[in-house]
Image (cartoon, helix red, strand yellow):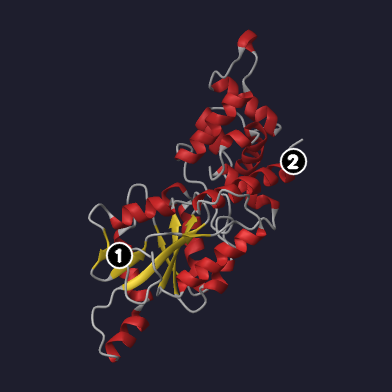
Amino acid sequence: MFSTFAVTRFVERYLLNSCKNEVNMNVQWYPGHMTKAKRQMQEDIKLIDLIIELVDARVPLSSRNPDIDELGKNKSRLILLNKSDLADERQNEAWKTYFQAKGFYVVKVDSRNGSGMKAINNVIQEACKEKIERDRRRGIKNRPIRAMVVGIPNVGKSTFINTFAGRACAKTGNKPGVTKGKQWIRLNKGVELLDTPGILWPKFEDQQVGIRLACVGSIKDDILNMEELALWLIDYLRENYKGILAERYQITEEGTSVEVLEAIARARGCLKKQEELDYAKASLILFDDFRSGKMGRITLEWAPL
């Protein structure tokens, strides 16, 4: 029996440990440390004009923490739908509309190959036009917009910063009035980025959140039962992307999810000794095909209508 609760507990423990590692803590991550990290982010947010929030376009709500809406309520907001090239384009547009209706600026990007990155600078200027106008009225010219990147562990914050900043970026060092130790990356004449991303943690109020995060690879596979996770993915794909498994593996999608996994194993020659089917290998093939986009562009969380 597939236990969503068991997988969710695994996922939750892993992600909390990831948060711990990102802030170099050598102690267990518990609510007190979450409070400390939240307090640190509150202090950092005071220094910036714009919050750039990364979410995984395949699971936009599951890969964000709504606490950032309260923390950044008086700041300009930009949501980046990262890995949008792997997500269903219809859903990319639906999520873009959804977030824009809530007052966010939104850009679809893939920080690994640089797709969509050129559009970000113009959107930053648009998102911060009130700040730029205030500076102009005060006689302040050419003061850079200061931004910070936030997101849950493993959503691609560091990759985005490296791609967006490029090799030519330079740390500008401490600024007058800025907390000691804060470093800023000068992206161009108009934008500076706080070099330490803000770390959020997922909300596990819905068990499906953990399952979705595991499916997109935000969780290390070796702590999960990949066969059970594969059965969930098979059921989801048959319901929402009918025919995609049949086309990829030249199999029938009829029968139970276990029977479909068996068919994938046979189609890909996943056999152990004595001709026994290797479900683990078939599951890894399924997830590799899904995560790499070989199966097509798929979104696991659809925008509310």
Crowd tier of the residue under label 1, counting other residues whose Cα lies within 10 Å: few below 14, some 14–19, many 20 or above = some
Q: Looking at the rendering, in which quadrant would you find the N terminus?
A: top right
Residue 114, given in percent of the width and then of the height, sits at 32, 51
- Tell me how far mark 1 sits from mark 2, CA to CA: 49 Å
- Which residue sits at x=47%, y=64%? 96
Which label's residue is closer to the chain start, 1 or 2? 2
Q: Kindly identify the amino acid type of the residue bearing the numbered disc 1.
A: Gly
Picture layout, residue 140 above or below residue 148: below
Q: Looking at the rendering, in which quadrant would you find the C terminus?
A: bottom right
Residue 240, given in percent of the width and then of the height, sits at 60, 47
- The answer to whether the residue labelled 1 contacts the one labelled 2, judged by CB atoms less than 8 Å apart, is no
Q: Nearer the viewer, residue 118 or 296?
A: 118
- Which residue sits at x=68%, y=35%? 228
In the rendered image, is residue 61 in sight? yes
Residue 160, given in percent of the width and then of the height, sits at 38, 54
Q: Nearer the viewer, residue 124 or 199?
A: 199
Q: Nearer the viewer, residue 300 or 61?
A: 61
In the rendered image, is residue 239 in sight? no
Q: Say whether residue 237 is left or right of residue 106.
A: right
Residue 66, given in percent of the width and then of the height, sits at 59, 66
Picture layout, residue 190 above or below residue 219: below
Looking at the rendered structure, the secondary structure element under dot 1 is loop
The furthest residue to the right = 1
Crowd tier of the residue under label 2, counting other residues whose Cα lies within 10 Å: few below 14, some 14–19, many 20 or above = few
User: In front of the other: label 1 or label 2?
Assistant: 1
Q: Kindly identify the amino acid type of the residue bearing the numbered disc 2.
A: Ser
- Which residue sits at x=72%, y=44%? 4
Residue occupied by mark 1: 173
Residue occupied by mark 2: 3
Looking at the rendered structure, the secondary structure element under dot 2 is loop
Q: Which mark is residue 125?
A: none
- Which residue sits at x=36%, y=77%? 177
